[in-house]
Amino acid sequence: MNSFTKLTLLMLLTFSLMSIAACAGSALAVEAASLAPIIREQNPAVAAQPSRPQMKSTVPDVPEIAERVNDVVVNVRSTSALGESLGSGFIIDAKGLIVTNFHLISVGERAKGAAQKTADAQAKLADRVWVTLNDGRQFQASVKGYDEATDIALLQIVPTGAALPVAELGDSEAARVGEWVIAVGNPLGLDHTVTLGILSAKGRTDFGGQFDDYLQTDAAINPGNSGGPLVNAQGKVIGINTLVLERTQGLSFSIPINTVKSILPQLLERGQVRRGYLGIETRDLTPDFRGSLKLPAEVRGVLVVKVERSTPAAKAGVRQSDVITAVDGKPLTSFVHFNRLVAGKAPGEKITIQILRDSKAYTLNMEVGEETRK
């Protein structure tokens, strides 16, 4: 047998082995598919597992998004007798409406982080606010409305020249932890800086505000980024960059854009936000609270730590150490959740809360009051 014949036989043998392996693989795949229903039937734990939808992560085209978003990002500068504040904002309406942070256009004593004012400090706005567009145009802005509690302000300019570009607002509730995000702003006076990161967490609280519900990101945010947009891989705004923890790296926080959407109609109509009020101060149920109240592990809700006198809650019979489990039938997840549900009610509206007191369940009805500014 010559070498050519040997080579030919070797090739034929190789192809035969490959075909046998492929057929065996197909047979095993078919057999596995046919056995899957039987496996699920015999193993309830497997059958109970819901099939998770295949959601693909989108890799952002950062240069394209930066070009598009940069046009809607503005430089915000406010001046007063106490000095100057520099920050960012973004255009939400072609008529000249701009969203930014309240702390950029206010003066006076402010607490660190998200709590803009001490309890007895009176809000005072800056003497002048200037807005500079990406194309260099500059306008003096008026304050259309503001909300200290969420650190949001709405500015108004009267544009001249070319039509204003407008930011596309996304859905912060639908944003997923781990997805790509991009921050655009003017950190330390460096106009239109673009940084990239991921959405690190949602629902961050305990920064001093009663409505804290921050998005956490590791996209670099620095002083001057405040008021600028945090956008997703589609270039839609999902947050307002607001807070950076000192002496940390990769811990930056943004106000969810859905918070802006919820109060925007009131800011446009009356310049302020009217919120429901019951006169209750609550805290999350810690292990210590659970132990002292002898609460079962499955109980969810918030603990009443204070009830103001002559308030709707006091008149309805709410007491200190009550555990509020639901509002209008909606189970509570945290004290911030409770605050938001109450604040979202219109003054005069009826509300029902479910409580636990001495291991007994009660339902209390009351009329929502109105939160007053201090």
Image (cartoon, grey):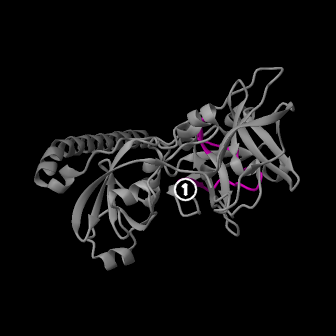
| Residue 298 showing in the rendered view | no
The residue at the point 82 percent across, 51 percent down is 85
Residue at 79 percent of width and 26 percent of height: 158
122 up-or-down from 323: above or below: above
**Is residue 373 in view from this perspective?**
yes
- What residue is shown at x 44% (from left), y 54% (from top)? 278
Viewer-nearest residue: 18 or 288: 288
Rendered image quadrant of residue 127: top right
User: Which quadrant is home to the C terminus?
Assistant: bottom right
Asked if residue 347 lies left or right of residue 184, the reply is left
Residue 276: image x %, image y %? 47, 47
285 in the magenta segment: no
SS type, badge 1: loop
Residue at (76% x, 20% y) in the render: 163
Q: Quadrant of the N terminus?
A: top left
Q: Position of residue 260 (x, y in %)?
A: 58, 41
Magenta stretch?
211-239
Exactly how many numbered labels are in the figure?
1
251 versus 104 height, above or below: below
Q: Is residue 234 magenta?
A: yes
Magenta segment, prevailing SS (helix, strand or loop): loop
The answer to whether 167 appears left or right of 84 in the picture is: left
The residue tagged 1 is 212
Between residue 257 and residue 141, name the one nearer to us.
Answer: 141
Image side of residue 186 versus residue 39, left or right:
right
Dot 1, crowdedness within 10 Å: few (<14), some or many (≥20)?
Answer: many
Q: Where is residue 311 in the image (x, y as percent from the top left)?
A: 44, 57
Q: What amino acid is found at the position of numbered circle 1 in the picture?
A: Asp
Towards the viewer: 296 or 323: 323
Residue 349 percent coordinates (x, y): 40, 41
